[in-house]
Image: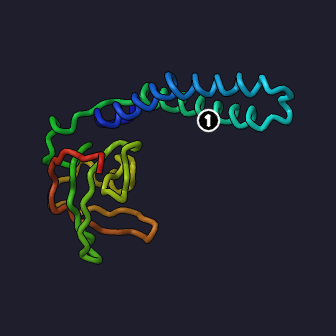
């Protein structure tokens, strides 16, 4: 099962609905129109539409699989005395003394540029279950890094920003 917030689940559901109810029927009509233009071997419109249909069908399959494996978790009801799904964590790099703030989310909701890291990332895996004051060691591309957990709390995520 893949943990996900209600927001993330709703976004996937909306995308799947859009693909099934709007985009796929539209591309099927485009294929029918292109087919009417004659010789399919040299019909660029037909081939482009078929390629788009393959992409849409693959995305529908992927989204359906993601939703089937999704476990919606409401992080607001979880205790955040230890790091868990939905926790916002302030950590300090013990080598550089640089502070970082991360929120642990599902893999499809992660966006490192906004401080949202996947629960499956190396840092999140090392953090989950730890408490304030604990030190963790994480293998990162730049090498082994040591961090101290400064603060753990829950803050609703603004996925729109």
Whole-percent x and y of residue 105?
31, 45
Identify the image quadrant of residue 94.
bottom left
Instruction: Tell me the quadrant of the picture where the N terminus can be found.
Output: top left
Classed neighbour count for the residue bearing mark 1: other residues with Cα under 10 Å, few (<14), some (14–19), many (≥20):
few
Q: Label 1: state its secondary structure.
A: helix
> In this rendering, is residue 80 above or below 136?
above
Q: Position of residue 8 (x, y in %)?
A: 34, 37
Residue at 24% across, 75% down: 97
Q: Is residue 43 left or right of residue 124?
A: right
Q: Left or right of 155: which side holds 50?
A: right
Residue 140: x percent and y percent?
A: 42, 64
The residue depicted at 39 percent of the width and 68 percent of the height is 144
| Residue receiving disc 1 | 55
Residue at figure coordinates x 48%, y 31% from the top left: 63
Does residue 67 appear to the left or right of 115 in the view shown? right
Out of 48 and 109, give the one closest to the viewer. Answer: 48
């Amino acid at each position: 099962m893949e943990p996900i917030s209600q927001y993330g689940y709703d976004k996937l559901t909306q995308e799947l609905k859009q693909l099934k109810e709007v985009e796929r029927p539209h591309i099927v009509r485009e294929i029918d129109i292109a087919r009417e233009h004659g010789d399919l071997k040299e019909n660029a419109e037909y081939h482009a539409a078929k390629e788009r249909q393959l992409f849409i069908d693959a995305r529908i399959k992927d989204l359906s699989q993601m939703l089937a494996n999704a476990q919606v978790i409401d992080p607001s009801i979880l205790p955040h005395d230890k790091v868990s799904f939905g926790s916002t964590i302030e950590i300090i790099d013990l080598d550089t003394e640089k502070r970082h703030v991360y929120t642990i989310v599902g893999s499809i909701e992660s966006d490192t540029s906004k401080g949202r890291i996947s629960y499956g990332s190396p840092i999140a895996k090392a953090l989950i279950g730890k408490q304030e004051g604990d030190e963790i060691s994480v293998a990162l591309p730049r090498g082994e890094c040591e961090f101290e957990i400064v603060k753990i709390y829950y803050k609703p995520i603004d996925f729109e920003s």
